Image (cartoon, grey):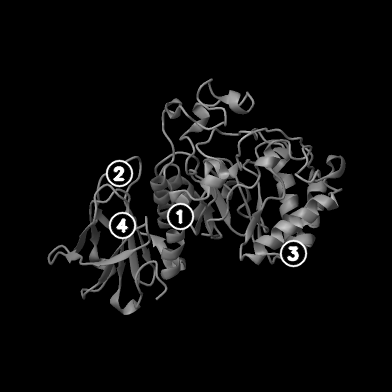
Amino acid sequence: YDAALADPAFGAELDGLRRPNAYGHVPLHDLDPRRPNEAYFEHVDFIIRSAADRGLVLGLLPTWGDKVPSKSGGAGPLVFTPENAAAFGTFLGQRYAEQPVVWILGGDRDPDTANAAEIWQAMGQALKTATGGRQLATYHPRGWSTSAQFFHDADWLDFNMFQSGHELGIVPMDRLTAETAGRTPRKPFVNGEPAYEDIPIRFWEYIDFGQPGPRRVPTGVLNAEGFIVKPDHFAHGFVTAGDVRRQAYMTFLLGAAGYTYGNNAIWQMYQVGKDIALPTLTDWREALDRPGARAMRHVRALWESRPLGLLRPAPEALHTAPEPRDGYPALVGHATDGSYLIAHLPHGGEIAIKGTYFTAGPLTAWWFNPRDGTAERTVTRRGIETGLIHATAPTAGEDWLLVIDAPEAGYGPPGSLE
């Protein structure tokens, strides 16, 4: 659930094999994966060491997906074959086997054409062999897809990743979690690309990707610096901090082991005068301090204060809840050892939970505020005849989490390691 897994590959999407980095280096000699450019990878070495010095684990993409055949296309060029993909995977694995990295194959593409699956399989297996299996690896598919559709049984795929995409609500996250969790053998899975903060909802309906940069939207939508000044062009609006909070907690309560926070300006590292992939509200520096980004620390704190590995979806525990708004329903998860239960109310309101998950004695209950990470003790009402546990969120219209602990569990306040 480390929130640092933002999309690092925008430069690769913009002809990154032929356009040099800031130091004038391209990654490959003559576009040949068998001939990596040492000068380029010395800078990659520096980035990985710098991240490790700060206690960060990087998600590394061996290549962006447009360098492998797919129906999604891209700038390319297509340079990989099964043979040179294996050679490149071996090179990367041997070079970074001792570094704190997670390998993410796929590059926002499905293996849906030509010999794409064979290429990814060769690269993944080479990485796994070269690292001795010491590092985790997964696959980043296109929107509304899960890696379990393509590589669940692959030896190199340690955990699955799905992309629920850049729109609101539980759809298609509910389908993707069910499809991924239902595979055998069971593997952990994460939501690798949910809706990014500040991104236009369903942006593809309002952008002409056949045009370059600012010309992808009508004249007047952007100002001279490339920022959006006519937001009404995007009729569905923009993903808010509340949306990324709701999607984060929803992801875990549906059974996932991780969630990726993203921001529209940061994924493309947009700065004035540079290329635009999607129109933005801010540059990447300003986006570092957006409220949704700040709220991710509270997501992590909650799951570090309770054993996340015990959490399972518990829709059967929900008796009554407010009607969904904007596609966000109330969700419930419980610990398999009966030590805690968590209910997410995306817009507040009253909830009734079946009390059969707990003994008849007193319970410890808290309202956890996902906006600031605070927790307040609350009193739940258990019906004598029905056994239902009733609770009402402190404020209406805002997202809250109800955390109920078995008294013998000995947990401290949610979000605290006390």
Q: Nearer the viewer, mark 4 or mark 3?
A: 3
Q: Nearer the viewer, residue 145 or 3?
A: 3
Q: Which residue is mark 3?
A: 97
Within-10-Å neighbours for mark 1: few <14, some 14–19, many 20+: some
Report the amino acid beneath label 2: Pro
Q: Which residue is mark 2?
A: 324
Q: How far separated are the C-alphas under marks 2 and 3?
A: 46 Å
Quadrant position of residue 70: top right
In this rendering, position of residue 238 left or right of residue 204: left
Q: Which residue occupies 38% across, 47% down?
A: 242
The reply to whether residue 68 is in sight is no
Q: Find numbered disc 2 in the image and state the secondary structure of the residue it sits on.
A: loop
Within-10-Å neighbours for mark 2: few <14, some 14–19, many 20+: some
Furthest residue to the top?
Answer: 219
Q: Which residue occupies 64% across, 26% down?
A: 212
Report the amino acid beneath label 1: Arg
Q: Which residue is mark 4?
A: 316
Q: Find numbered disc 1 in the image and state the secondary structure of the residue it sits on.
A: helix
Q: Nearer the viewer, mark 1 or mark 2?
A: 1
Q: Find numbered disc 3 in the image and state the secondary structure of the residue it sits on.
A: loop
The reply to whether residue 93 is in sight is yes
**Disc 1 and disc 2 in contact, CB within 8 angstroms:** no
Q: Compared with residue 283, is residue 354 higher up or lower down, i.e. above or below?
A: below
Q: Nearer the viewer, mark 1 or mark 4?
A: 1
Q: How far separated are the C-alphas under marks 4 and 3?
A: 44 Å
Report the amino acid beneath label 4: Glu
Q: Which mark is residue 294?
A: 1
Q: Nearer the viewer, residue 308 or 358?
A: 308
